[in-house]
Image (cartoon, rainbow, N blue to C red):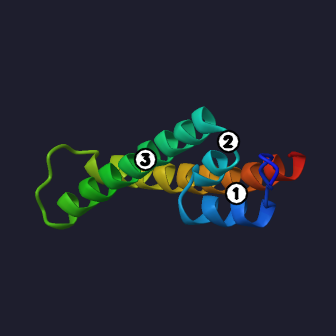
Amino acid sequence: MDEERISRPGLAAVLSFVFNGLGQIYNGQIVKGLLIIFLSALSMLILLGGAILIGFWMLGKIAFSGQLLTGIVLFAAGLVFICIVGIYSIFDAYNAALKK
């Protein structure tokens, strides 16, 4: 049997949908996949930080005056970055698998 790997664009896209960066790793783009995983984790931390600040504000444990606004901005930015990284990961994995 041939050592050449058969690439499946649909599988690469589904893997990236399930876990950002996994489709790139499947395609052999290890560094790119790890970078996408890192950016996805960073986006989740930003979202979590915003959610914590909003939660503290809701519980009345105000640490500083702009806590609610800061929490909303961090939460929204994290959500936007998660969507951008996820969509990019899916399309990039699919297109990279098509080129193989």
Label of residue 28 in the image: 2
Label of residue 90 in the image: 1
- Badge 3 density bin: few <14, some 14–19, many ≥20, Cα 10 Å: some
For discs 2 and 3, the disc positioned in front in the rendered view: 2
Please name the amino acid that badge 1 sits on.
Ile
Q: Residue furthest top?
A: 31
Please name the amino acid that badge 3 sits on.
Ala
Kindly indicate whether the residue at mark 3 contacts the one at mark 1 (C-beta within 8 angstroms): no
Element under label 3? helix
**Horizontal and vertical percent position of residue 59:** 14, 66
Element under label 1? helix
Mark closer to the chain start, 2 or 3: 2
Label of residue 64 in the image: none
Residue at 25% in and 56% down: 52
Please name the amino acid that badge 2 sits on.
Gly
**Horizontal and vertical percent position of residue 88:** 70, 50
**Horizontal and vertical percent position of residue 93:** 73, 51
Q: How many marks?
A: 3
- Residue closer to the observer: 38 or 64: 38
Q: Residue furthest left?
A: 61
Cα separation between marks 2 and 1: 15 Å
Q: Which residue is mark 3?
A: 41
The quadrant where residue 15 appears: bottom right
Cα separation between marks 2 and 3: 21 Å
